[in-house]
Image (tube, rainbow, N blue to C red):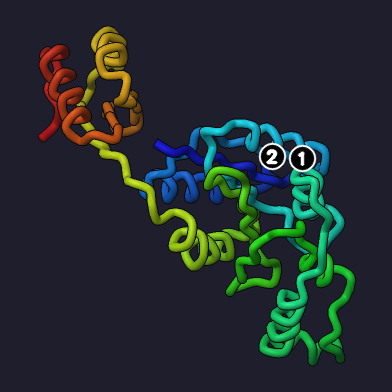
Amino acid sequence: MPSSSIVAVGDELLRGFTVDTNSNWLAGRLFSLGYPVKRIEVVGDVEADIVAAVQDHMARPELVRIFVCGGLGPTPDDRTFQALARALDRPLVYDQATGAAMQNLMFSRGIAKLRGTAELNAGNRKMAMVPEGSVILRNGPGMAPGIAFPLVSDRFLFAMPGVPPELRSLFRDWIEPGYLRDGSAPAVGELHYHLAPESAFAEAMLALESEYPDVSLGSYPQTELGRLIIRASGSDSARVQQVLDEIRRRVGRYQPLA
């Protein structure tokens, strides 16, 4: 099954000022589309750290869709595009169409009237400087565009704005229909137990991991509800169901909720 990865960029994430809802949302969407996330990495607004993380992900051939989130804005701490240019060994180039789209937004939102001009300032122009060879992904709600960059062997690197509504809009409008159509959603099954200890399932789960290496199996306690969820997922729905049936049989002391 093809895998994805996420590089979330921002000092605010590392310092606890902002919760990384983007990675959570993306991971759920990518799993349902058949491109489950295998790796999530958070880095600060340091160009060298972004470069190192992106190059590390690109060096892993199993990661066929790599998502870099955040750091596309107009201020000096927004360094993602220049870091990607270094990671890809491509120069930054000014995208005229992006600049024109920004000016249209400035008129429609009254920014040009407030400024007294529709001329782009240095911060605006910075958002339109993208690595050469990028496919521009228009950002409907915002100014900073996203990009898709083709790597080798049907692999793609994406850069997306960190503002959650913008990221989600861009993903739905461009990435999902254009770059994730060939995925196949994994099958998922769950067993819910009441007041059942995780340790009671450990031996059976360990054996089933060896017997069904193609099925991912995990336990997830919800202590506030007094419940335990045993979840299995894999590409073959029949195999997933077999694993759940085996859990029922091998841990018969506890019966799952209906």
At horizontal 38% and vertical 45% (from top left) the residue drawn is 34
Q: Amino acid at mark 2?
A: Val
Quarter of the view holding residue 101: bottom right
- What separation in Å lies between label 2 and label 1 (alpha carbons)? 5 Å
Toward the viewer: 233 or 203? 233
Name the residue that disc number 2 marks: 54
Q: Position of residue 78 (x, y in %)?
A: 79, 55
Q: Are marks 2 and 1 in contact (CB under 8 Å)?
A: yes
Looking at the picture, how far across and down is residue 191, in whole percent?
20, 30
Residue sitting at x 25%, y 13%: 211
Residue 25 falls left or right of residue 52 = left
Task: Indicate the amino acid at tag 1.
Answer: Val
Residue 31 placement: quadrant:
top left
Q: Which residue is mark 1?
A: 51
Q: Which secondary structure, mark 1?
A: helix
Label 2 crowd bin: few (<14), some (14–19), many (20+), radius 10 Å: many
Residue visible at 80% across and 51% down? 90
Q: The N terminus appears in which quarter of the rendering?
A: top left
At 51% from the left and 65% from the top, the residue drawn is 174
Q: Is residue 87 left or right of residue 26?
A: right
In this image, 248 relative to 128: left or right? left
Residue 16 to residue 74: above or below: above
Of 95 and 125, which appears nearest the observer? Answer: 95
